Image: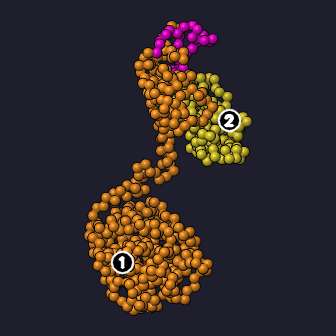
Amino acid sequence: MALPKRIIKETERLMAEPVKGISAVPHEDNLRYFDVTIEGPEQSPYEGGVFKLELFLPDDYPMTPPKIRFLTKIYHPNIDRLGRICLDVLKGNWSPALQIRTILLSIQALLGAPNPDDPLANDVAQKWKEDQNAAIETARQWTREHAKP
Amino acid sequence: MDPSANPPQPQSEAPRPQRPGHRDMMFCHECNDEWYRDEHGLTCPECGSDFTEIIEEGNDPRDSHMMDHDHESDNGSLPGFDGPPPLLPFFQPNPMRGADDPAEEDISSLQFRQVAPGRFTVTGTVYRDVSPMGRPAPAPPTENAGSQAPRALGGLTNFLTNIIGGALRGPQQQQQPQQQQPPGFQWNTEHADGQNNPGNDGNQQAHGGPESRPPGLPPGVHRFTYTAGARLLPRDPNNPGPRGEPVDELNNVIVGLMAALGEPPGPHHHDHFHSAGPVPINPLVHLFAQMLPGNGQFGDAVYSQEALDRIITQLMEQNTSSNAPGPAPQSEIDKLPRKAVSLEMLGAEGRAECSICMDEVNIGEEVTELPCHHWFHHACIAAWLGEHDTCPHCRKGITKQPENATNQGQAGGSSGPTAGSSSQGQMPGAFAGGEGTSDNPYVL
């Protein structure tokens, strides 16, 4: 299956105009598969960390959202231990007007604004609600341990 | 327990310290195994330990193991029995004790149930050396038969008894020489008259006793022994558990049931169903066979975290758009107005692109405009609307009732709102708990 022009364009623009704190590099042998890094947002417990993700554009992209997963361990109420992300625009709120770039920005924003009321990692979310300071400290610690630049 | 070796004996000799033909029973303090001295000698055949002891009527090392747990609730002290206290249920002589039966000594959890006046159902469960999960052999039980779990299992045991009893044609099984049975998990089920009732708290006065013991197994009473490759109750002689014993893992139970039903459950099975005739094919065998862990999943059941993760991921991907609006009707898509791109549509930069294919559009090119005035290549937006009736930019639907119409289709099964700050609240149906809401007209 030929690579749709949109994917080529998106890739070119990601390279030409990179987003601050975000990188997405396609694999040479599979241009639908991207190695992604996202820097933890400032003022968040993930600050200073660099998180690796994998991103895959399915065949019917952009009619379906990209598949994205954290590879770096992260303590976040909306990201489970397998790295799966609970983010509306990756699911039902996907729109073909969204792009890799915007999705990655959304994920970065999610790091800055955890939403324990809609958890994917239930235990983390519960901790986040019960003792937010402790949860944030754990997130900091995990960032130091696992998300080294 | 061999009925053929069970001639009528004087009934009053139950507490006798020795009797003719007595065989020394050995007890291993390490693993609690028991065996006949004349068969395996003084060293434990199970664990090879030398810390063994000859079991005597007045000095049964098992007593302390068995009694210290349950007895402490009575007087808070460990038992120091000089002889068999006749009133303690566990020391009531088993009416079958005269029978020279290796399995007899292995019955470590007896379930007595009064089924009629003067009639009791006796169910014995024995824990031996087989470990279907490849674990070391569980120690024999240290609790007496009064614990809750065996009683609960007794119902199942009786249930199985009925199934298998039919398969074995019942009483013929009495003639089976029990000495030939291989060591291993013994699951004895008996029906006999006038058994005493050591395990039932409410019937401890019904000691029965030798006088009510039948000389053999009376007519109409059947007894059989089948072997299984599993333990049912985990035991630890050094660390007795609570009264309500935990029921063993389902897998082990199933393996045990499988063996009981005569089907080799797998590589761990090493006992055979010592029935005289072939066992009729039991439909339960096939049912249980499917539940074996070796076969992986049983229906929707999963046995490992990995399998669960896999399924959840699968579900998440399947439901990727479960809370997204359903498709717009093709007729509505076809009706969308088309127009040529004009200069003012290009915006300040003087150029624009279709945000779906990201191709640049030029003045004069035909595009399709939605009611919200966002426009796209017709093929691009038609492909999207055919799946979800939302504008890619503002999420408004193209149908006449945009608030409700987007609930149509597969709105059900949504797990609710999702995280993230990008939700624009413009997605009718995105938070729908299911289809068929009262305000959903199902416009098609």
Which element type, helix, strand or loop, lies under badge 2?
Answer: helix
The span from disc 2 to disc 1 (Cα, nearest Å) is 73 Å
Which label belongs to residue A142? Answer: none
> What segment carries the magenta color?
B336-362
- Disc 1 marks which amino acid? Ala
Percent coordinates x, y for residue B334 in the rendering: 42, 17
Kindly indicate whether the residue at mark 1 contacts the one at mark 2 (C-beta within 8 angstroms). no
- Residue B331 is covered by the magenta coloring: no
Percent coordinates x, y for residue B388 in the rendering: 48, 26
Quadrant (top left, top right, bottom left, bottom right) of the C terminus of chain B: top left
Whether residue B265 is visible, yes or no, is yes
Neighbours of disc 1 within 10 Å: few (<14), some (14-19), many (20+)? many
Q: Is residue B190 left or right of residue A35?
A: left
- Disc 2 marks which amino acid? Gly
Colour orange, chain: B
According to the image, label 2 marks what residue? Answer: A112
